[in-house]
Amino acid sequence: MSKIRKVAVAGGGIIGIATAYFLRRAGLDVVLFDQAKLGAGCSHGNCGYISPSHIFPLCTPKALKLGMKAMWQSNGPLRIRPGLNLSLWKWLFQFAGHCNQRDMLAIGHARHAILDSARELYQQIIEEHALDCNFQAKGCLFVYADEAAFVEQAVQIDLMRKEYGVEFSSLVGPELESFEPALIPGSAYGAYFYPQDAHVRPDRLINSWVRVLRELGVEIREDCRFEHFLAEGNTVRGLQTSQGVLDADTVVVAMGALTPFLNQQLGFQVPIQPGKGYSITMSCPAICPERPMIFEQDKVAVTPMQSAWRIGSTMELAGYNSTLNRSRLELLRRGATRYLREPFGPTVEEEWFGWRPMTPDGKAIIDFSPRYQNVMIAAGHNMLGLSMAPATGKLVSELLTGSTPHIDPTPFQYPRKQRAARKQSRN
């Protein structure tokens, strides 16, 4: 590939923003565009976690049982409705193939590297640019209602400590209630605390980071819809958009859950399904937790954001459904009510859903298109787009400029090289 001068980044979520930032810091001309407003998609209403603790993917050995149950259950935290959606059925079969201990540990190593890098980079970027994003490094509590679930999770926690060196502490009974007084006494048996985790208010992070992009000279176009590549052979020379032609000698596709709409143009079937998540944002309750908590058995997460209070999570795999399902919001309310002395603030600011870009193995795709030598995909970050964004942006910049990658890019290539090599060795 010839020397890069101008890069077009398609997708104005947190991954696109981070990518534009690092490309511009590398001295390249950058245009960042989105079909809507920057940060209006899944990056807007998530729980704001920066989570080095979220190492293991969803495809764990016990996930198959949970997935089968979700196929027939309409009121659980995980809801799967494949219907006649053949691409979702294919995704589910691929997901099932990864639900084993060997894959879980290998995927965990890839996620651990990118998550740890991103946590460190966030600290640097937020301090350097004084980003106004409600950043707090207060850790995260994973809360369990009963002893059986707490003890069962201890096996996974110990595995994370041995494999990846993750720091944690365990809190039980009165010790937990003293550590987090916002919990209803007796509502939880125990919790695991991860001190390295942090959190932000996502919309404020995006607004502040976009301000920095403008100051650095990044060209930003909103309400600008991607239409098609302008190519000569296997090289893209620009893009046709709803606002006209964008000249660029390199393109990064960072469109999250919408990336599969470019399958034909990219030259392969992008294995991403939209995993619909929900949140409710309120003013802060009088008795507000000190730190984020995840109520593991209910799959409900809560985040105190200084300027707001957010309850979120759940997962729907049902295609690109754009309905705000109020029964899913009620699940969030019930989960919070089960554990918190004061689960709701006096004023509801927003009820929201977003499509998470879910891959079958829980790893992002950060690789070149098989059709075009100068088109890179940076998508499929599952539930961790915000957590992984800075490290993704830095890695994309390194790969495009020929710099030494700060983390191993191999696990994020597609097709997955490690899995393909294992299959070949068995033949």
Image: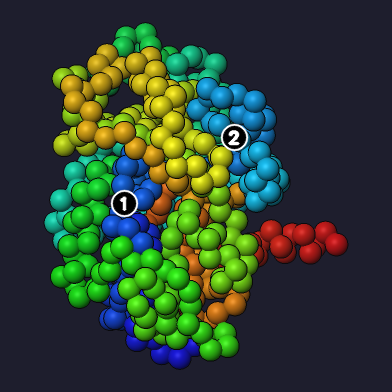
Residue at image position (45%, 86%) is: 237
Amino acid type, mark 2: Ile
Q: Left or right? Give the position of 162 relative to 417.
A: left
Q: Position of residue 278 (x, y in %)?
A: 40, 35
Residue 344, image quadrant = top left
User: Vertical placement of 107 versus 175: above or below?
Assistant: below
Q: Position of residue 89 (x, y in %)?
A: 68, 45
Residue at image position (35%, 78%) is: 244
Secondary structure of residue under mark 1: loop
The residue identified by callout 1 is 40
Amino acid type, mark 1: Ala
User: Vertical placement of 408 versus 354: above or below?
Assistant: below
Front residue of 282/50: it is 282
Res 52 visible:
no
Q: Left or right? Give the position of 46 relative to 86.
A: left
State the quadrant of the C terminus: bottom right
> Furthest-top residue in view?
186
Q: Position of residue 238 (x, y in %)?
A: 42, 82
The residue identified by callout 2 is 80
Q: Could you classify mark 1 by the number of other residues whose Cα lies within 10 Å: few (under 14), some (14-19), or many (20 or more)? A: some
Secondary structure of residue under mark 2: strand
Res 117 visible:
yes
Q: How is the image coloured?
A: rainbow
Front residue of 151/26: it is 26
Q: How many marks?
A: 2
User: Vertical placement of 130 versus 93: above or below?
Assistant: below
Label whose residue precedes the other's in the sequence (1 or 2): 1
Residue at image position (27%, 14%) is: 341
